[in-house]
Amino acid sequence: MGKTGNNSKPPDPLENCVQTWTIDDVARFLRIPRKSVYLLAQNGEIPCAKFGKHWRFCRELVEAWFRARMLGQEAAEAPCPAKARGRRGAAKAAK
């Protein structure tokens, strides 16, 4: 039995994710301070994932996000755990 075109899955954005970057890698690529990358990640403005206390970025998604920003286009947001739960310091600042 062969595959049919009716069972096509939606494209997986991580399918082409070959290289994983750290905060330092992204900061070096964007030529901005590490703190700025942390803020972008915490606010869900850049495609990322958080594993415990470590942020990780798919190189290909960051490059696509950067190209879209440079061209003035809205980049499709990738899920980022910090956006759903909010910034850690926001609750402390409200007290």
Image (cartoon, grey):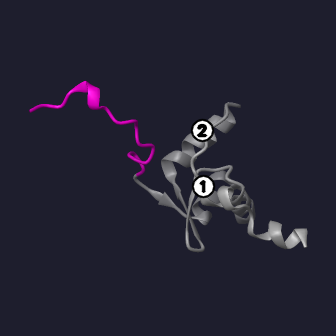
Q: Does the magenta stretch include residue 13?
A: yes
- Is residue 8 visible in this depiction of the protein? yes
Q: Residue at x 40, y 37 (%)?
A: 11
What's the amino acid at mark 2? Ala
As helix, strand or loop, the secondary structure at mark 1 comes to loop
Q: Seen from this angle, which residue lies furthest right? A: 95
Q: Position of residue 39 (x, y in %)?
A: 74, 60
From the image, tell me which residue sits under label 2: 76
**Label 1 to label 2: alpha-carbon separation:** 12 Å
As helix, strand or loop, the secondary structure at mark 2 comes to loop
> Which residues make up the magenta segment?
1-17
From the image, tell me which residue sits under label 1: 80
Q: Which mark is residue 68?
A: none
In the image, residue 35 sits, relative to residue 65, either above or below, namely below
- Is residue 41 visible in this depiction of the protein? no
Closer-to-camera residue (56/59):
56
